[in-house]
Amino acid sequence: MHLLLRTLWHLFTSSRQSRLTMWDASSMPMRVLFTDVDINMHINNGMYFSLMDLGRFDLLVRSGAWKVARRKGWNPVVNAETIAFRKSLKLGQRYTIESKVLGFDEKAMYFEQRMVAGGEIYARAYIAARLVGKKGPISNEEIFAEIGQPPSDLILPEWIHGWREANALPGSRRPAPHAWI
């Protein structure tokens, strides 16, 4: 909720940026705001994922996929994510959020996102997301029919499958009891 107004602002400004395809990399200029930092005056580790949401929205809006999703009643949801930090982004610092689709499997669309300042990666995340409608997840075939086929050289890196499997929880219709192992 804390990023609602900022999200709406970026949805508006992204729609006025140059058009991309869903398969291009998007780059969104940002600045570290007071609401992004913790007591150490750098972006709070939990805030990175919220800010990266804005980067994915930028790619969706600029590619036209956001309009399609809204018209169809599809909503993007994140299934899994992981992040690595290299340097801290500090209050007032300019940076960009770089976002790119890595590929698909039968369960998700995979993104790589980077926080970049001065030509260097400060943080990098991998996100598994899907589009869901009222009846559940939207198939790749349905998505591709609306936003276009991915390029033939867009091949999901092999290690993503292992990462996804190692981090998966049971589906929402199966039990997932809480017990420390």
Image (spheres, rainbow, N blue to C red):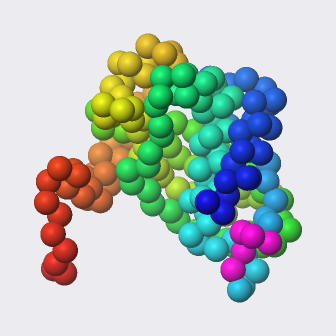
Residue visible at 44% across and 56% down in the picture:
81
For the record, the magenta segment spans 34-38
Q: Is residue 32 above or below residue 109?
A: below
Residue visible at 21% across and 50% down in the picture:
171
Q: Secondary structure of the magenta portion, mostly?
A: helix
- Counting from the top left corner in percent of width and height, residue 122 is at 67, 63
The quarter of the picture where residue 39 lies is: bottom right
Image quadrant occupied by the N terminus: bottom right
- Counting from the top left corner in percent of width and height, residue 14 is at 75, 35
Q: Is residue 42 above or below residue 77?
A: below
The quarter of the picture where residue 120 lies is: bottom right
Is 63 magenta? The answer is no
The quarter of the picture where residue 51 lies is: bottom right
Image position of 134 (left or right of 166): right
- Counting from the top left corner in percent of width and height, residue 83 is at 50, 62
Q: Residue 119: tell me if it is visible.
A: no
Q: Count the numbered circles shown.
A: 0
Residue visible at 53% across and 46% down in the picture:
112
Residue visible at 62% across and 66% down in the picture:
47
Image quadrant occupied by the C terminus: bottom left
Q: In front: 9, or 90? A: 9
